Image (cartoon, grey):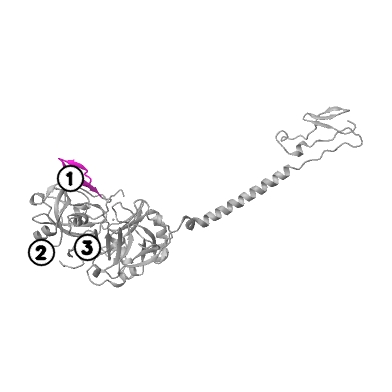
Amino acid sequence: MHDQDDGGFRIDLRRNVRFSARRWLADTNATDSAIQFDEVPLGVGVGTHYAEIYLGLPPQKASVIIDTGSHMTALPCSSCIECGDHTDPPYEVRKSTTANYLTCAEYTGRCAECDANQCRVEQRYAEGSMWSALMVSEVCWIGPLQDDLSNAAYLVQKYGVRFPIGCQTKETGLFITQKENGIMGMSQDPNTIVPFLVQAGVLQRKLFSICFADAGGTMVLGGVDPRLHLAPPMYTPLQTTSGWFTVEVLDILIGNTSLGLAPSYYNTGRGVIVDSGSTDTYFPASVQSTFAALYLKLAGRVYHEDESIKLTPAAQRLLPNIQIVLRGNATGSSVVLTIPPTQYLTASPDDGTVTNNIHFTEHSGGVLGASTMMNFDVIFDMEAQAVGFAPSHCGLGPSVGDTHPAISRGQWTDKTFWDSYGSIVSVALACSLFGVTIFLLRFVYRQCRQRQWTELALADDGTPRHAVSPIGVHDEEAGDVPLRTPASPQRKLSRSPELHRIQELDDDE
């Protein structure tokens, strides 16, 4: 444990190197100031990072996955029969002198049902796991403590905060097999731990930072530890107030070559969220073909999303970097996250194969998961409504040279409709104008032809003039003579002057 003037709680993270891919199933989130800087290990879980928390008096320890993509904290209770074996014993409500069950009226979140007037909640995840729990109000402290727990009661009493947790009575899927006891949601929901710590006066600001590394990492509550940074952080603004940490992806590059797609391709639906509880990173399926074609061209190999491949470390380093471009805080700026191949390839601890951890499977929107957050100190500033990224060794020593990600600031100009489609519209307008011109010329030409009049022969030297009527020609000597018109099937329909030319009568008729 370390005290520091600039404040905040610092928690060292641990990580489990075994692979899994938990994602919350959603209808689908800086500066330094606090009173204390407390270093607590974040552990290594099943493809995740976890922290240790202490509940109630006397304190009971539990390990929880740090999940910025959900908002509830829950862990198995002793009453759960099929909750699996985890790092720590199940939480026992009856042993705590500070715990009490919450009624449906007392819990400010959403209850799935009222079980004997106790609030029951449920949560389901995209890979199929779920849990069900009764809500309990309990005093909570985020560790670590001394090994003999001699300072546990003191810290829980002094710095602990009363906080709603889910006492799980049922869990399925990965929650049964995972190493960690439970999960701690850290989205922007008011029922997460940071707002409660601020309200209790333990923290001064609603922000925290998470730094993931292969061997563990660090979480700081209420502040930022600049000693972890290899470069100053750069911030991207949050796009919604939905409760998620939603950022805007402007572009994806392979090497230094852009996919050439508009930002709208990446940010459909709920948008792209920063989610520490998701092992991998996900983008819309509509981007997959463009990405795969460019990757094949630049890397000389097919990008396999779900297939493990044998690839030596030297061969990995020859592959191109992947750059994710986010909107910058300043107008016309962008934040470029450069992910090296050694980071977007997940190594299997069993057979030495690697698997790509960036996927293109989403119907809409996307997730920047732990695979993208690795080796960055990611700052979640709920007051400034921004997320910051700083390359970092995460408190675990110097970086590993060329395997480390990088961050840079770029320029970005939002394209208007005319910028994107102006050339197409111009060609369409030119073609339309040309077509209209041709039509008008043809129309005028035909009208001019229809106005050719045939002069009638006028009688002279006293010859009787023929009178014309609809039924024929009236000759003063011969009387009415029917008009003789050329035989034509168009005669009754045509207005052509050639079909109605008046013929002169012979003098001898």
Labels 2, 3: front one? 3
Q: Position of residue 110 (x, y in %)?
A: 23, 45
Going from the N terminus, do you reach mark 3 or mark 1 first? Answer: 1
Going from the N terminus, do you reach mark 1 or mark 2 first? Answer: 1
Residue type, mark 3 in image? Met
On residue 404, the disc is none
Residue type, mark 1 in image? Glu
Mark 1 highlights which residue? Answer: 106
Q: Dot 1, how many residues are within 10 Å of its Cα: few (below 14), some (14-19), or many (20+)?
A: few
Quarter of the image for residue 36 reads: bottom left
Going from the N terminus, do you reach mark 2 or mark 3 first? Answer: 2
Does the magenta run of residues contain 356? no
Residue type, mark 2 in image? Asp
| Residue 47 visible in the current orientation | no
Q: Position of residue 402 (x, y in %)?
A: 31, 71
Alpha carbons under labels 3 and 1: distance apart = 30 Å
Mark 3 highlights which residue? Answer: 219
| SS class, disc 2 | loop
Report the span colored magenta: 104-124
Labels 1, 2: front one? 1
Q: Position of residue 282 (x, y in %)?
A: 33, 56
Does the magenta run of residues contain 113? yes
Q: Pick whichever, 281 or 451, lies toward us.
A: 451
Mark 2 highlights which residue? Answer: 147
Q: Residue furthest top?
A: 479
Q: Dot 3, how many residues are within 10 Å of its Cα: few (below 14), some (14-19), or many (20+)?
A: many
Quarter of the image for residue 288 reads: bottom left
Q: Dot 2, how many residues are within 10 Å of its Cα: few (below 14), some (14-19), or many (20+)?
A: few
| SS class, disc 3 | strand
